[in-house]
Every structure is written in structure tokens, then in C-alpha cells.
Amino acid sequence: MKKLKKHINFDMVKIILTLAWPTMLEQLMQTAVQYIDTAMVGSLGTQATAAVGATSTVNWLVGSTVSAFGVGFLAFIAKACGANDKQRAKKAAAQAVLVVLAVGMVLTAITVGLSGVIPVWMQVDKNIQALASTYFLILYLPMLPRTASIIFGTVLRAAGDTKTPMKVGVVVNIVNVLLNFLFIYPTRQMTIFQITFTMPGVGLGVVGAAIASAIAFTVGGLLITIILWRHPFVSPKGESLKPDMSILKPCFRVAIPNMFQRFGTSLGYVAFASMINSIGEVATAAHTIANTVESAFYIPGYGMQTAAATLAGNAYGARDEKRMKELARMFLPIEILLMMFSGAMLFTFAPALMSIFSESEEVIRLGTTVLRMVALSEPFYGFSIIVEGMMQGVGKTKTPFAYNIIGMWCVRIVGTFVCTQLLSLGLVAAWGCMIAHNMLLFVLFLICYCRNAWNPLKESAYA
């Protein structure tokens, strides 16, 4: 036991888990609502599921582009907090407000303006193009509050406050679910615990799901803005909202490579989904549902990544090389164990989870196959997530950009094109290309970690 204590810093483990669990719970709630949304829409039929899922990769494209700006502020504010520079952190939060306004308004104009043609570009079946377009339009009308939720949530996490974004996320999810019940279905009789009552409803179907989500996003954006304004450490109150290049330049140096990475990989997801959509309705439905199911099992990985980025940024700001090395030594085994467990759960319960969202035996069988394939690669992907998170926290985003773009476009997209468009191999082959992409990332980040290329303090020590 004494030897175990010597090698394990339990205080550090406690700090890691304290930062990580609220983010995990927040993502779990978001995924639970995704599950509920998909199940509710899925009850309307395969076409409804396909209409909602056909543009989901564009959602990732937009959301990840916004998140990239958040990563820039995360690295800056985490470093300021590590150096105990409260004033600099507050100034950065004020600049985050400026970025939210600019990015939110630009993305609103782009997404709303392109809502009519995106389903066409995505090769969505002509029978559901109009419905998919309407769903997308409504979902992106509140783009400004959605941008605020993402960036302001990251600002709070960078300051070590992961509980507040979690609480806001819980409220957003509750609002979304309640409004789904109201807007998706018509007025009907329901029985719960042998009590029968009339449940009012508008009966808007897929459009109702979009309205419910749009209102929930707006509520979340307003709440996180009010909370940030009142925050004791990173409130922008009283700070100038004029552009401050001494803050924006270092933030953008981190954010821009990350934005191109996210944009490039998300565009790859769009191309990937577009090729899958061209296979047929069953493949689209199975792919959409499998993606929804799979997302829950990445929660431990991405929850730990947020903690890794924050703590690495703090250690870098404090110029604490010992703590930086200890972080990596503690994070990686915890992450791999968590992802091994989640992968085993996904492999075991894949058929049951698919059956929640679809009654089609063909969709369930196809989705189960690809989920079990990807479950085996989760521990390897978890390693990549942590190393990338630490690199984000210290502002090193160029290397992850290169790795992710190479993996996405040279392995996943080229491979999927050959498999689905030239060889007609279907969804299983496409997901095989996705797994090959994840394994390449593992190899590249492993080499980066072994060479200590992720640690700027080690580099400066050598210099």
C-alpha cells in the first residue's frame, strides 16, 4: 500500500475527478436528451429520424467552429489563473463577450441563409429535403445564445468552475424534454402508474422538436451570460469591450489552428455523412442512431479532456514542470480504464440501445454491428483525447490540427469514398475507415507523448 501511495498522488486524483465529473454529468445530460429526442422523433418513423439526422454533421461543424474560439480563451484564462492574475482573466472574459457577439451574428446569417440548400448538399432523400431544411432553419435561429453557451461555458471551466456550466446544462435539458412532449405530439391520453390523464400537445412532429431545442438553447445562453456577468473571478463587468489585441492575438494563435482542425474534421464528418446518406435510408437511420448511442460512451473521455486542458494550463501558468509531468502520469491510466469500461458496456448493450430508437430489425442489426466495431477502439481513442487536451491547455494546437486533418481526409474520407462509392461496401466498411482514422490518431499522439513534444516547460528546460 505504501508503494501504491508513492506512485499515486491521491490529492491530484481528487482534483482531476472534481474538475471532470461536472463536465461528465453535463455531457451525460446532453446525451440523455439526445437519446430522448431521437427516440421521440424515431417513434414518428424512419423518415422523421432521417430528416433530423441528415444534417447532424453540419451541427457538429458549426458547434465545433465555435468551440475552437473557446479553446483559445481556455488556454489564456487557465494560464492566467495558474499565475493568479485575476485582472488578466477578467479582461479575457470581456474579450470573450466581444467574440461571442461577432461570431454569433455571423454564424446566424450563414446558417439561416444556407438552410434551404444544406440538405441538398448533404444528398438527403428528396422526399425529406424540405422537412430537413425547416428543422435546420429553426434550430439555428438562436445561434447567438448557442454561441454564448459554448464560449462562456468554456471561460468558466478555464477558471476551474465546471459545476456552473453543468447546472445550466441540466436546466436546458429539462426545458428541452418538457417542450418536446408539448410540441412533437398532439393532445393525447397518457397513463402513468395507472393514472390516466390528458396530455396537451401541438402535434408538430419534427418541427416541434426543432422549436423545443431552439427555446432550450435560448434559455441556456441567457442563463450562462447572467452567471458569467456575476462571477467573482472572471466577470467581464467593468472591463472594456473594445478589441484588446494583447489578449486576442494569443487567444487566436491557439484558436485558429484548433478552428481549422475542427472545421476540417467536421467538414470531413459532413462528407462522411453525405456518402452514407447516398447509400440509402436504412444506412442513414442506422448511422444517425449509432452516432447518438456512441456519443454517450465518449463522455468519460471528453470530461477528462476538459480537466486535462484546464489543469495543464494552470501548471503552465505557474511554470510548474513537476506538476505538468505528474498530470500526464495520472490522467492517462485513469482515462484508459474509463474508456475500457465504457467500450465494454457499449459492446454488451449495443442491440438493446439501438432498439430504443428504432423498431426496424435491419436498422438495429446494422447499427449493432458498427457499434461493436467501434467499442473495441475506445481505449486507444481515449489516449489521444487526453494528450490533445493537455496540448490545448498549454496552447499547442498546431500539431493536433495536422494529426486530425491527415487522419480525417487521408484515411476516413478517402477510404470511405473507395469503399462506398467505388466498391459499394456499405455502412460497415465506412465505420471501418472511421476506426482506422482513430487508430492513426492513437499512434501519432503516442509518438508525440513519448517524445515529450506536448510539454512546453520541458522544451524550455532543454533550451
Image: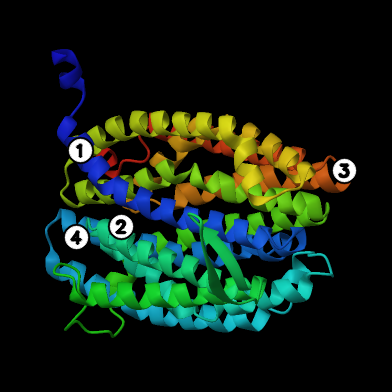
Q: Position of residue 214 (x, y in %)?
A: 51, 76
Give the Cα distance between marks 2 and 3: 44 Å
**Residue drawn at point x = 37 percent, y = 68 percent:** 151
Q: Is residue 132 left or right of residue 384?
A: right
In the rendered image, the quadrant that contains the C terminus is: top left
Give the Cα distance between marks 4 and 1: 22 Å
Camera-nearest label, 2 or 1: 1
Reading the image, the residue beneath label 4 is 80
**Residue drawn at point x = 79 percent, y = 48 percent:** 417
Camera-nearest label, 4 or 1: 1
Give the Cα distance between marks 4 and 3: 53 Å
Reading the image, the residue beneath label 2 is 75
Q: Is residue 224 left or right of residue 32?
A: left
Q: Is residue 239 left or right of residue 196?
A: left
Reading the image, the residue beneath label 3 is 424
- Above or below for 442 versus 232: above
Q: Residue 134 shows which numbered tag?
A: none
What's the image's color scheme? rainbow
